[in-house]
Image (cartoon, grey):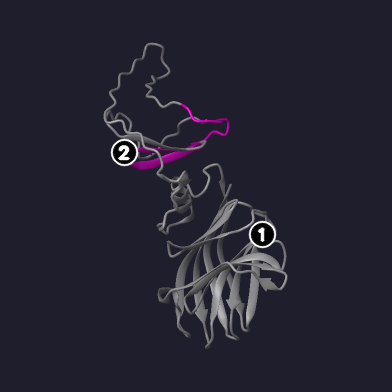
Amino acid sequence: VRDWTPHPNIVAGTTQFTFGVMARNAGFDVFYNGGFVGGVSDTSIAEAGAVGLGVGTTSTLISSTRAQFDDLLITVPYHNDGTTVIPQRMIVSDAANMSLALQRAHMVSPIGELALTVPAVTVEYARAGINRRMVGQGTTYGSFALGVQVTLQQGSLGIGGCGLVIRSRGDADYTLVYLDSSGGYGISQRTADRFLPGLFGSEPRFATAPGTTGRHHMLVIADRETVYYYLDGYLVGTVANPPRMGEIGAAVVNFDSTVTTCRFADLWLWRW
């Protein structure tokens, strides 16, 4: 898979420690004394195998090693009717830690990569409708997790909001994930001039009053069959979405003629 490399948390000469491995498919996360020290993947692994304990020596021919293993514990993911349980809450953090947490929660594949990071994107609009700004320079994505910090600022009366554009194949063919100033949120697929019924909800805690600023975290996970939507770390809904490749982007979503500014910070995308 790959050779071990030095790590500041592993102190030479230590003879007593805890060691753990979290495995999912061909991905392995390694933990030393409760801290994450690295991850590896091996795509040549095609099926499940046995679990055991091993001891190694140094490179010299006469070296020997003796080890005692205590309190070995093996756990397996909890399933409901054969399907993975979807977490109702995710801790909001940076791209590296959040993508790792999603892998451990079995929400994304460990055989993937952090394919896109964008420090900042600003989108403005002063009338009713949607103003999109695509990111990624035309790159398309199929299965992915997309996270971003969003700042919504509305300068006049009316309902305006911010959104993420996913699986876009043109100006009238994409899926929109949004949050508006009234506290409304949703997922809807646009086809030609119509937005198809999808997900809609509303909660006062997500609302932003005119003349004020609202800050929220949006997380969208799109796999082969479903789009999952997390707001400020809470799962607010899911919707079936056809699997296909498409671009991503940021958007202002104005339901009324109002001035709305959306600032997207620390946007990241994990794809597999």
- Graded by Cα atoms within 10 Å as few (under 14), some (14 to 19) or many (20 or more), the crowding at tag 2 reads few
Residue at the front extreme of this rendering: 81
Q: Helix, strand or loop at disc 2? A: loop
Q: Does residue 28 show up magenta in the picture?
A: yes
Query: Up-down: is 120 above or below 125?
Result: above
**Magenta span:** 27-49
Q: Residue at x 60, y 86 (%)?
A: 257
Kindly report the distance in space between the C-alpha atoms of the residues bearing marks 1 and 2.
41 Å
Q: Residue at x 45, y 75 (%)?
A: 214
Q: Position of residue 161 (x, y in %)?
A: 54, 76
Query: Up-down: is 7 above or below 105?
Result: above
Q: Earlier in the sequence, mark 1 or mark 2?
A: 2
Q: Could you tell me the amino acid type at mark 1?
A: Glu
Q: Could you tell me the amino acid type at mark 2?
A: Asn
Q: Position of residue 225 (x, y in %)?
A: 59, 53
Q: Position of residue 88 (x, y in %)?
A: 41, 58
User: Between residues 192 and 36, which one lies in front from this camera angle?
Assistant: 192
User: Between residues 128 and 224, which one lies in front from this camera angle?
Assistant: 224
**Residue matched to label 2:** 33
**Residue matched to label 1:** 247
Q: Helix, strand or loop at disc 1? A: strand
Q: Going by the image, does 188 lie left or right of 13?
A: right
Q: Position of residue 21 (x, y in %)?
A: 40, 36
Query: Up-down: is 188 above or below 24?
Result: below
